[in-house]
Image (cartoon, rainbow, N blue to C red):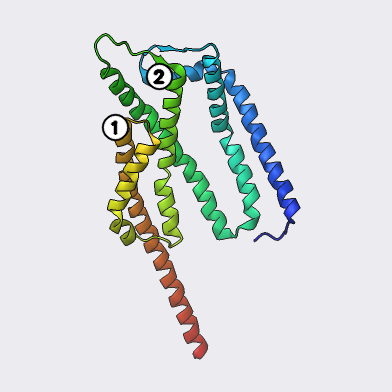
Amino acid sequence: MGDVQLSFLEHLEELRKRLFISALAVVLAAIGSYFFIDFIVDLIEAPARGLDFIYISPPELFVAYMRIAVICGLAVASPVFLFQFWKFVKPALDKREQRYLLFALYMGVVFFAIGVGFAYIMVLPLALEFFVRIAAPGIEPLFSFSYYLGFVTSVLLAFGIVYQLPLLVVLLGSLGLVSPPFLRKHRKLVLLVIVLLSAFLTPPDVVSQMMLAGPIMLLYELSILLTALITRKRRKKEQEQEQGFEYEDTDTSD
């Protein structure tokens, strides 16, 4: 625990300060992102590989641009509000908890970026190509940009969130709440949950769902290996500490 104890009102004031800084960072980042909206739209349209987009109501495109600016603002300002979150909770944590939280924040960003990158490079082009190919003769695929933006956002967000699974498993293993035998025993149940979660998070198409479920199962197996290594290291450290205590007791008795 920190040396300085704050009252309830002081905690509220500290929370208000952190929220204000975070909100200000998001607003400024969103405004800045809007100046690069053409470049960002080009990046969003890239997975569509030359498809044409339309908008079907006067304000639709403007609203879509606002959504893009806000989403980019959240992404750009994420280091700021993650740092504000860290500063707010740090006084209430001991050294061990601080290390775990820093590890979770850092690796959470890394895994989220990996998930988003995989979805952008691999999943979106394949899913869009699948949708275009199923068009019947005489039906031209014309996508509303607003609906396309929602599709892209949902896929990227789903992959970014679900790619946090290895981090969650490793943290639980580090805290001793799960073990490798437990994870292996419930592998089939986890597979079922991943398939259901993929169907819930991704758009209603088999391509996106399978491309989400497949890598997650591989990451789950990787998390089992990492948890086994962490568990083995923790047990070895505990055995060394026990041997050290036994050695000290022997010296005292002599």
Q: Nearer the viewer, mark 1 or mark 2?
A: 1
Q: Position of residue 249 (x, y in %)?
A: 49, 84
The residue lying at 42 percent from left, 33 percent from top is 116
Tell me if mark 2 has few (under 14), some (14-19) or many (20+) residues whose alpha carbon lies within 10 angstroms of its own: some
Residue type, label 2: Ala
Mark 2 lies on residue: 46
Q: Position of residue 105 (x, y in %)?
A: 52, 46
Instruction: Between residue 168 and residue 237, name the one nearer to us.
Output: 168
* The furthest residue to the bottom: 254
Q: What is the spatial separation of the Cα atoms under label 1 and label 2, in whole angstroms? A: 22 Å
Vertical position of residue 244 compared to residue 140: above or below: below
The residue lying at 54 percent from left, 59 percent from top is 96
Q: Quadrant of residue 70?
A: top right
The residue lying at 32 percent from left, 50 percent from top is 190
Residue type, label 1: Val
Q: Are marks 1 and 2 in contact (CB under 8 Å)?
A: no
The residue lying at 39 percent from left, 60 percent from top is 178
In terms of secondary structure, where does tag 1 sit? helix
Q: Quadrant of residue 230?
A: bottom left
Q: Position of residue 140 (x, y in %)?
A: 32, 10
In terms of secondary structure, where does tag 2 sit? helix
Q: Position of residue 47 (x, y in %)?
A: 38, 21
Tell me if mark 1 has few (under 14), some (14-19) or many (20+) residues whose alpha carbon lies within 10 angstroms of its own: some
* The furthest residue to the top: 138
> Would residue 130 appear left or right of 28 to someone viewing this image?
left
Mark 1 lies on residue: 206
Q: Quadrant of the N terminus?
A: bottom right
Specify which label sits upstream in the sequence, 1 or 2: 2
Instruction: Between residue 79 and residue 243, name the one nearer to us.
Output: 79
Instruction: Between residue 36 and residue 248, name the one nearer to us.
Output: 36
